[in-house]
Amino acid sequence: MSFDEIYARYVDSVYSFLKFKLNDEYLVEEILQETFLAVYRNLNKLSTVQSPKSWILTIARHKLVDHLRSIKHEEVTLDHSMLVQEFSTDLVLNEVLNQLDSTAAAIVYGLYVEQLTCQELAEILEIPVGTVKSKAYTARAKLRNWLKGAGQ
Amino acid sequence: MNQGYCKEEYYSDLALGYIQGRLSILEKQTVFRLATEDPDFRELLRLELELAKELAKLKESTPRPVAVNSYYKVKSSTADALSCGFTDVVLTSILNIIVPQSAREMILIRKGVCVYER
């Protein structure tokens, strides 16, 4: 796969993931560029990865963490409540997601928005698959309860 | 269903698999059967579908100017690096032939300072 194909196929996934994590358009664009620059420089590794999407999102997550470290954020584990954007589409959903810890929110995002598997999410977030599964199970139950309540 | 794998977990996994489009034909048949026979599963599936619809709103497309700008920045920075690398190789080869060792080092230090200042 050429760089142009990769860029065309995954730029939206990276952008959307970064927007989910940050409420700073300028920073999102900067990290987007750094992510694809790293992808370009490591294109030879692509043939060895199982899922290009999770490989690229892992790079994006690392770049995001690096940036947060460099701007002296003390909490480099990506505190969701601190970083998450204010969703213009649905503030209630935002509130519910804020109640989840950052890892759980990222898992929910990955499962429903990017259609990633638990295995892929484990690779991206660098945590065991079992942790992804249990966090996903709890977070999804919480979200379903919220929906149930909203529907009443 | 494995031991220690409760009904709720099984239903939850099945519903997610259905939403993500990862189920086999047999599993899909199970989903349809459960959806008609079991009110608990039907409710769970309904909520999962609604949840998927809500969360799909989080997906954002890259604004075209951002996508284009980022693409060209990546391309140009890698092109710069490549041309720098090429220039370095050519210049070093020429320097090695025509300039004495001490002068060569001075030139390379000077070049490093220029690059740093740039």
Image: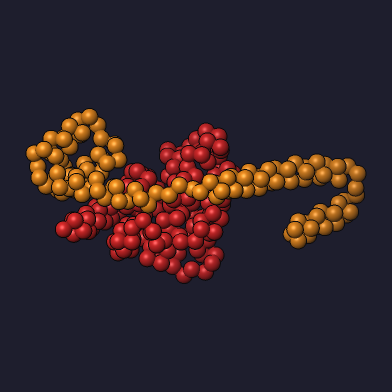
Count the marks. Answer: 0
Decide: is A128 above or below A77.
above
Asked if residue B1 lies left or right of residue B63, the reply is left
In-front residue for pair A46/B80? B80
Quarter that holds the C terminus of chain B? bottom right
**x 76%, y 56%: residue:** B115
What's the image's color scheme?
A: by chain
Chain in orange on the image: B
Query: Where is residue A46 shown, x and y percent of the image?
Result: 50, 38
Q: Which image quadrant is residue B19 in?
A: top left
Residue found at the very far top of the displayed protein: B25
Q: Is residue A102 visible?
A: yes
Q: Which image quadrant is residue A147 in?
A: bottom left
Quarter that holds the N terminus of chain B? top left
Q: Colour of chain A?
A: red
In-front residue for pair B71/A62? B71
Q: Is residue A119 visible?
A: no
In-front residue for pair B43/B16? B43
In-front residue for pair A5/B47? B47
Query: Where is residue A26 shown, x and y percent of the image?
Result: 54, 59
**x 42%, y 63%: residue:** A83
Asked if residue B26 lies left or right of residue B99, the reply is left
**x 73%, y 43%: residue:** B83
**x 44%, y 42%: residue:** A53
Query: Where is residue B30 shown, x and y percent of the image?
Result: 16, 35
Asked if residue B99 lies left or right of residue A84, the reply is right
Query: Where is residue A8 shown, x and y percent of the image?
Result: 51, 39
